[in-house]
Amino acid sequence: MDFCRLHYVLFVIFIADAASGFAQTKGVTSGAIYTLISKSTNKVMDVSNASLADGATVDSWTNTGSDAQRWIITQTSKGIYTLFNVGSGKLLHIAAAPADKVHVIQDGSSSGTNGQWTIKSAGKGTFYLFPVADPKFSLGVNAGDTANGTAVSLYASSNGDTQKWVFQKETSQPVAHTEAATHKAFEDWATGYSVQTGKGFWDRAEMMEIVLDAYEVTKEEKYKTMFDSMYQHFVASNKSDWLYNKYNDDITWAVLFSVRGYLLTGNKTYLEKAKDQFDKMYARAFTNTFGGGLIWYETKTSKNACINGPAMVACCYLAQATGDSTYYNKAIALYSWSKLNLFNAATGKVYDNIDLNKSTGLIKTSFWSSTYNQGTYLGAATMLYKQTKERSYLDEAQKFAKYTRDSMYADKVMNNEDGGNDLPGFKGIFARYARMYAVETGKTDLNDWLLMNAKVAYNNRNSHGLIQTKWATRTGETKPKGDFGSSTAVSLLINVLPLKE
């Protein structure tokens, strides 16, 4: 338990004990967890987008079971209560001096009356919530507004249903970084999209790696069985020789699930396929143009991080699987070339690609960065450090990690990469290699940040248990488009779990 959460738990215990001598509002148990349901809309009181920040708006939303929609109601003195959000650990506050249509927010401060409430029966199992700061107002929703995201606000007190709340008592439930929550999120995703029999190539390959992650982390046989089935389906759908596909990165992703499949299950069929397809891909993708490196797409000239990063990782896995050290040599050569062309060793930023500027005859660089490329280069640096024990690889791995956390996301929740067909699946790749980095190097610098991402993403699931790829944005009740985008949070939840021995 971290210090902030311990402080919060002790504070709740303290105020509960302090108020134990006072009579409680009938039907409300101090210290219990409740979902607050609007009598007029049947929507629940909810912290917008499961935010952990002070000042986040409180709104009404379809009940998804999220901890962002659960509140610990605690009596602090005679007739006075506080409401702590279970997801954020922050208090329900009024946003300004009480007035008509003043919104409510969450805030960490427990001083003053802005976070204090009186609770009065409204009859038939419903209650009013009055701010202690001015009980002429009552908490409610705008009449007739049933849309998800409608703000919860103060209104001049009345006896209408818009200001009545049903207090539904709840029990505590598994949180994001628990195995129970992860298995449920995986099942909701896999079943909701029929993942086991889906079509596609590189996105399918990446999602097959998520299944392998689940097997590697939890050791549950059901994930091994699922991977075996998906492998057979992939080969049947994408031919036995994948070189018909001109995207060299696509082939490399299929190599990755094959070689990892062997390393985790011992099935030699997977290794034979991985070695055969990688060797063929490498032979056609490597050229001396721009001094080395692999071409992203056959017939084009650009050399991209999206092929060179996963190819380095594949080389390291193949070396482990076969005992052939020449694969490590290839990985080191690609890494050294990338250091000159595709990443900044001082900052840890990975560039997207280099290509020839035909008008000048000079090499041009695309400096765009993504979690996909940051992740694969983090993985490659980690694996090469483990093999060579050269400190420069570890230093650069730390830079890749730090750049992603601090420069790309300012230590906040990853809430982008949602456009097109490929981007929505990128963050799941980063989550995998962040786990590898932590496990193999013992570095913990990403841990708290990833746990925060997991907590917010999980609390932003919809009522079907699905989580879209913008983790800091609540998932709508309409099924998110595509299993690939929804796979990223599943990858995150799996990869923040501790490994089982």
Image: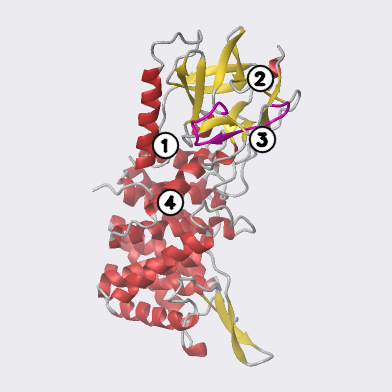
Three-letter code for the amino acid on which mark 3 is drawn: Gly
Q: Give the mark nearest the N terminus, 3 or 2.
A: 2
Q: Secondary structure at mark 1?
A: loop
Residue located beneath label 2 in the image: 138
Q: Nearer the viewer, residue 151 or 246?
A: 151
Three-letter code for the amino acid on which mark 2 is drawn: Ser
**Image depth: mark 4 or mark 2 in front:** 2
**CB-based contact (under 8 Å), mark 3 and mark 4:** no
Q: What percent of the width, then of the height, locates residue 24?
A: 47, 10
**Image depth: mark 1 or mark 2 in front:** 2
User: Magenta segment range?
Assistant: 99-114
Please tell me which residue is depicted at 39% across the width and 11% down the height of the picture.
21
Q: What percent of the width, then of the height, locates residue 458?
A: 49, 41
Magenta span includes 463? no
Residue located beneath label 3 in the image: 149
Q: Secondary structure at mark 3?
A: loop
Please tell me which residue is depicted at 53% across the width and 53% down the height of the picture.
414
Judge from the rendering whether residue 290 lies leftward or rightward of residue 396; answer left or right: right
